[in-house]
Amino acid sequence: MPFLFLIYIIAYLDRVNISFANLDMSKDLHFSDQIFGTGAGIFFWGYFLLEIPGAIIVERWSARKWLARIMISWGIITAGLAFVHTWWQFYGARFLLGAAEAGFFPGLIVYLTHWFRQQDRAKAVALLMSAVPLSQVAGAPIARALLHVHWMGLAWWRWLFVVEGIPAVIFGFVTLLWLTDRPQHAAWLPDDEKDWIIGELDREKEIKKAKHSYTVFKALAHRDVLTLAGVYFCAVTTSYGCTFWFPTILKRASGLSNEVVTVVALLPFFVSWLCMMFNGWHSDHHHERRFHVAVPQLAACVALAVAALTGGSNVVLLVGLFCVAIGGINAYLPAFWALSTLTLTETAGAAAVGMINSVGNLGGFMGPYVMGYLRDHTRSFAAGIGALSFAAFLASVLTLTVRHHRAHPE
């Protein structure tokens, strides 16, 4: 788990580092808010194309080899973002980055099903997903340290992409050499523990097969799978709309310097890490998933609605509301991904996870794009923040229609 946590921090950092780069990038390249929002979100169209195959590859072939391939390729492309000069280069690099990273996250979720029982899975996912807010906590000091760097005549935000791309390449090779695919391959695990976890996981598979036997195509058409894809689309719309735009919103609302913004922007993500860990533990403790997804989304909806109505006139209130909003849109993740693995198993389950993540992550295009589009056309962030609030509301409502939502400990 510590190793998975580390490589997911690297992955998420490379995905969202443009949120800090944009403190100066758009100004230097003469990008409008709509161009930045589109480029931030176009990542997810590349991501969309290879999600399902990537998840199935992890189930049928090797997590170690597939994750290593992904990390090495995305690290190279991240560093390449340092050399963009036009909007079409920016769009192309972000699209290729998404295509390179496709399959990484669903691969990790499928990989956890090879090691953790259902009743323990939300805690494991919480540990993994805590990398989401903590990647922002890690990214802010890196951005701050580079703010006044102009090595070789390149602006600091260009070096940000280079500095954060290199670790992905290095740890890609480490993953290839170090990660263990399944418990039966773990020479470091005592035989009695190995036999126990293999037996527990096999028993869970047999129980699921006895209740539901699905082909890949039937799994993709499963009612709960389609509903969860809709939930994830709405939730991700809100999540990336906030993540990509919050530093820029804060800077423009407050007039604070880049140095101060990179510090203050840490707070909502630290709060969301605490919320995520608690919600994952609470979900496993009560063997319940559905309300542990819906309630955090509803909290995010209310906080963003208030932020839209107040218009950012009070900076302290704005930061507090985004603490609640970003806390909610991250806290639901452990219970959500545990919920997504309740019904299906093996290849059908892997395909379902890939499909949920693939379709859902198109919201990663929608959120940043809508924010940029509405900002350009209304000259205010209020309408965009209101749209993100509505998306969180839809995620909450859709979650309550999911039928399989309890993690039975027996």
Image (cartoon, rainbow, N blue to C red):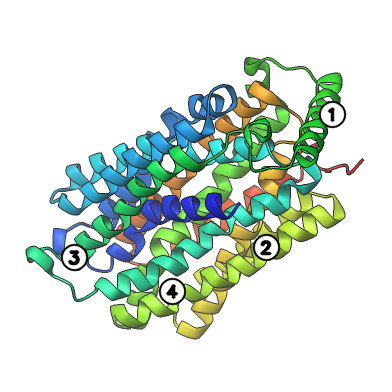
Task: Nearest to the eye among marks 1 and 3: give it.
Answer: 1
Q: Which residue is mark 4?
A: 265
Quarter assignment of residue 146: bottom left
Taking the spot 18% from the left edge, 72% from the top edge, the residue there is: 149
User: Please, is residue 292 above or below residue 102 in the view?
Assistant: below
Q: CA distance from mark 3 to mark 2?
A: 37 Å
User: How many residues crowd around disc 4 within 10 Å: few (fewer than 14), some, or many (20 or more)?
Assistant: many
Q: Which residue is mark 1?
A: 203
Residue 204 x/y as whole percent = 82, 31
Local SS, label 3: helix
Look at mark 2 in the image and give the residue it sits on: 277
Instruction: Report which residue position mark 3 lands on.
Output: 27
Q: How much space separates mark 1 and mark 3, taking CA atoms?
A: 57 Å
Of pointers 4 and 1, the one earlier in the residue sequence: 1
The amino acid type found where label 2 is placed reads Met
Instruction: Assess whether mark 2 and mark 3 are in contact (beta carbons under 8 angstroms).
Output: no
Residue 394 screen position, x and y as percent? 63, 48
Work out whether residue 308 or residue 150 is closer to the camera in this orientation and state it.
150
Q: Are the residues flagged by discs 1 and 3 in contact, CB closer than 8 Å?
A: no
Amino acid carrying mark 3 in the image? Lys
Is label 3 or label 2 in front?
2
Of callouts 3 and 2, the N-terminal one:
3
Of the two numbered discs 1 and 3 on the same chain, state the one appearing first in sequence.
Answer: 3
